[in-house]
Amino acid sequence: MKLVRHPAPHPTESLMGYVLRLSENNGYMSPWSIYQLARMKQSDARSTGMRVGKLAAISLRPESELSQIAFAPPAERPRWCRLLGHDLVPTDLSMTAATFCPQCTLERGFIEAHWHIRLMIGCPIHACRLSPDCPGCGKRIRWFRPGLLECACGFDLRDKTNPAISLAEASLLGIIRRKVLRLPASPENQSSMPEAQLLSMSLRSILVVIQVLGKYRLIADGFAKEEGELQLVSAASRVLTDWPINFFTLLQSLGDRVLGATNSGVRKQFENIYHALFKNKTIQPPEQTDFIKDAFVDFGANHWGRGVVDSRFLGSRRGSGAGRFMTQAAFARKIGVQPRTAAKILTDRGIPSRRLECGAASRVLIDANNVSIPCSSPGIVLRCREAARQLGMSPALLQDLRRRGIYGVQHLSPTRPGFHPLDVQRFQQRVLTLAQAPIPSTDCNSGGISLGSVFRNPHHSVATKATVVRAVLSKEIVVVNNVDGTLAGLQLEANTCQLTLLDAHKASPRENSQPVAKALKSTANRIQGSAQNVIKTISAVVTSQTKEVTLKDLAKAEVHA
């Protein structure tokens, strides 16, 4: 016998909801009449293994059309089930309780498939909590009832009122719904959840992650026993909101509550939640939770401070940096020195550190926030002459600027010689930006002195030139213009520049006499060496075996003198 009315199922409709709608359209009081007409057993209508061939025969619909919304498992996974093509396990679904949103059913005219998921305890669209009980009879709402919005007792489910849920809970339930229905991510992410990362996972993995995060949030809150789906969703939504801040809070709570003063690696300290998230065989492929693992590594390296993040655990994340808390070996690699040199730097500068026992070994943990030592950045290190050529000054002046702290070093280890291109570029931009500042008309003069002429003047010492550069950076000397975009092309206000040069010469009156003194000292050294040679020659002649002083020897001594 065939049904009189046989409407087509919606692509996102629940199979049991479709049978209920089919029963209502044909005037039956319960879907059980449909199952009896199809010669199906009651057990077939209550399990995920329901075959749709008999239903297709009486509803005059293609079997392939009903298979799209069926729960039957794939052939390669007989113990699993499906929901709109998503592979799940039977415990993920609820086949008996008919928990759904009456308002959504009224608006769409059918019951969507995502209401079969046990974790769907509320409606993300209307932000209300759903109850499986009927307000009229107080009994659980069943799939065997007269209509979509009518209970078996005759109560109109449209009159059912439901309490509100939080924004975080609605956002998390919305992610589940969008994943089931294959909808894109919401353009509005008011809860700051990792929505895109979660939607890239499989539906089964999303449900597992929610259960794990909810479970450990409840453990951290002091719940001794495992709660129901409502508590799990509520707790997980609090962890995923403002990601990853609240995830860090969860790990911090677990560490303070369970671990105490355990001295070991971060992975060992949080072994339970680590294995539940990253070693769970139900999460396939495991790369789906990489965004959670990145947050876990970030917490251990930058926030925990009571354990070591092993380099083997970092894997591909090793290139992202050592983080705030690092071992002494990682600190040595960061600043580009040997471990012994790093240990000496820590001791000499009094940098605080903590020694942790990691199994049979011990590690020294350092807080990078207490370290102001620059590290070596990637790139080719320039020699002094090449760096000075790029800046348009002499190597001696560049060395003096570095020694005085005028040329800052931020991308090179203090023990490594040379000049990093990033530091050279930073110093150059720091000076060139002075030409872009507005110049007061009272400070400007039509006749300017170029910074290049100061660099090239042989009568100015290195110290005097360094004093001018310092005055330019401190804006004591006004930069009027830049003629060619280089440091040498900076035009300085003439009067202020001349006064600075004069004060620098007065502060170092002996600078101009240094070359003469150096030449005189060299001449004296040569004269002293010649005199010593004369004395040695005469002594050798006098003490010779012949004991005779020849005219030739005296002439030789005279030549040396």
Image (spheres, grey):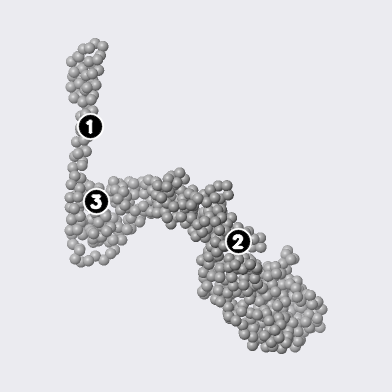
Q: CA distance from mark 3 to mark 2?
A: 62 Å
User: What residue lies at 59% left-to-right and 62% top-to-bottom?
Assistant: 289
Mark toward the start of the polypeptide (1 vs 2) = 2
Question: Which is more toward the observer, 38 or 207?
Answer: 207
Q: Which mark is residue 525?
A: 1
Q: CA distance from mark 1 to mark 2?
A: 77 Å
Q: Which residue is mark 3?
A: 465
Question: Which is more toward the observer, 405 or 131?
Answer: 131
- Amino acid type, residue under disc 2 in the picture: Ile
Q: Residues within 10 Å of mark 2 (few under 14, many from 20)?
A: some
- Amino acid type, residue under disc 1 in the picture: Asn
Q: Secondary structure at mark 1?
A: helix
Q: CA distance from mark 1 to mark 3?
A: 31 Å
User: What residue lies at 19% left-to-right and 36% top-to-bottom?
Assistant: 520
- Looking at the image, residue 283 lies above or below residue 403: below
**Residue 103 image position (x, y, % from top left):** 62, 84
The answer to whether residue 200 is visible is: no
- Looking at the image, residue 187 lies above or below residue 257: below
Q: Horizontally, is 480 left or right of 140 in the view?
A: left
Q: Which mark is residue 273?
A: 2
Q: Secondary structure at mark 2?
A: helix
- Amino acid type, residue under disc 3 in the picture: Lys
**Residue 393 image position (x, y, % from top left):** 28, 50
Mark toward the start of the polypeptide (3 vs 2) = 2
Q: Residues within 10 Å of mark 3 (few under 14, many from 20)?
A: many
Q: Which quadrant is the N terminus positioned in?
A: bottom right
Q: Which mark is residue 25?
A: none
Q: Horizontally, is 56 left or right of 289 in the view?
A: right
User: What residue lies at 28% left-to-right and 58% top-to-bottom?
Assistant: 473
